[in-house]
Image (tube, rainbow, N blue to C red):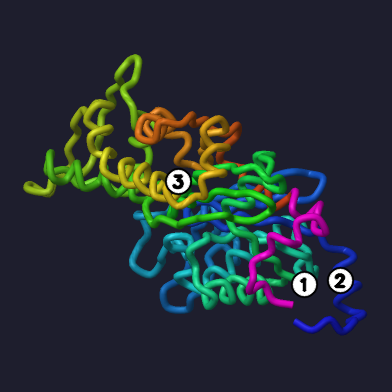
Amino acid sequence: MSNVFKPLEWALGRFSVDMGIDLGTANTLVSVRGRGIILNEPSVVAVRKDTGEVLLDGMAVGNAAKAMLGKTPGNIEAIRPLRNGVIADFDVTEKMLRYFITKVHEGRNWVKPQVVIAVPVGITAVERRAVIHSAERAGARRVYLIDEPMAAGIGLDLPVTEPRGSLVVDIGGGTTEIAVLALAGMVCSTSLRIAGDEFDEAIVNHMRRHHNLLIGEQSAEKIKLTIGSAWPMQQELSMPIKGRDSITGLPRKIDTTSIEIREALSHPVRLICESVRAILEEAPPEISADLCDAGAVVCGGGALLYGIGEAISDHLGIPVRIADEPLTAVARGTGVFLDKLDVFSRVLSADEED
């Protein structure tokens, strides 16, 4: 983008609200300067298959579209345009971003805000450009990209600009981002395509294998949120599950326990623990010394899984704490980033466009 002064764009920018966006596989959160997080909706869009047009006059996005997942008639499709933290469907992502930008501006679709978008650390330069272009075509005047672990570290008020190591584990919907932060940069990091969606998938597979019961991803998510755990509970729970019998093809109901679901989730939880361990082994010794006391901070939706902190701590032997309001850490970080663009310009993604 050139730096030539454009009067019209400047004027439209004057009336716009700059925003930070946590563009997640499961949920998209929008943070606005001075107002905090004003929008938190599922990253789902309902479209007509033949025309690609968004239903309800462009408004079938977020909560309205998520209710349709797995229940749409043949001519309608509920799409999650992001997979594993990256754009899988460009057109739908652009429509979703336009919906969020317009909603923040209360229907004014001619505005041109500055937008900060948090992206996974593992995405390629081509995927970064795709995010920038989608946001620009959705109406953004200027787009900045920030890596998710750095945004989370800023949002959690960790000492990311100091010569002290901080370990962030951000378990989202599509990816788990793990990074050691110091001096406003990432010392070492990784992006693991195992996160909330894999937890749901593990539950679906377990039910099919052990009970011949077919359930949808919405049901699996409900089970995870209600009785899912990564560590033994003080009082184990149970709940009924409804689905389709894979042998008879008829609806059926069974009861399951938190112990059984914990067993179903044990594999993805172990893979996350092992990835955190690999990052710790990669970190310089001085950073490791800092982390002995500081430990790790877990955020993202996966931080809400009961006992995930205890499971990681037990695997690594360092203290682990769950962030306050873990779901909003990255979005809060994009908001702080907007406020302090001059301070944090050093953490801008290397291929952020001029």
Q: Quadrant of the C terminus?
A: bottom right
Left or right: 301 with respect to 262?
A: right
Left or right: 215 with respect to 118?
A: left
Magenta region? 336-354
Q: Residue at x 76, y 51 (%)?
A: 32
Label 1 sits on residue: 141
- In the image, 162 versus 1, the foreground residue is 162
**Farthest front residue in view:** 285
Q: Residue at x 40, y 28 (%)?
A: 310
- Report helix, strand or loop for mark 1: loop
Give the Cα distance between marks 1 and 2.
Answer: 9 Å
Disc 1 and disc 3 in contact, CB within 8 angstroms:
no
Q: Going from the N terminus, do you reach mark 3 or mark 2 first?
A: 2
- In the image, 278 versus 263, the foreground residue is 278
Give the Cα distance between marks 3 and 2.
Answer: 47 Å
Label 3 sits on residue: 280
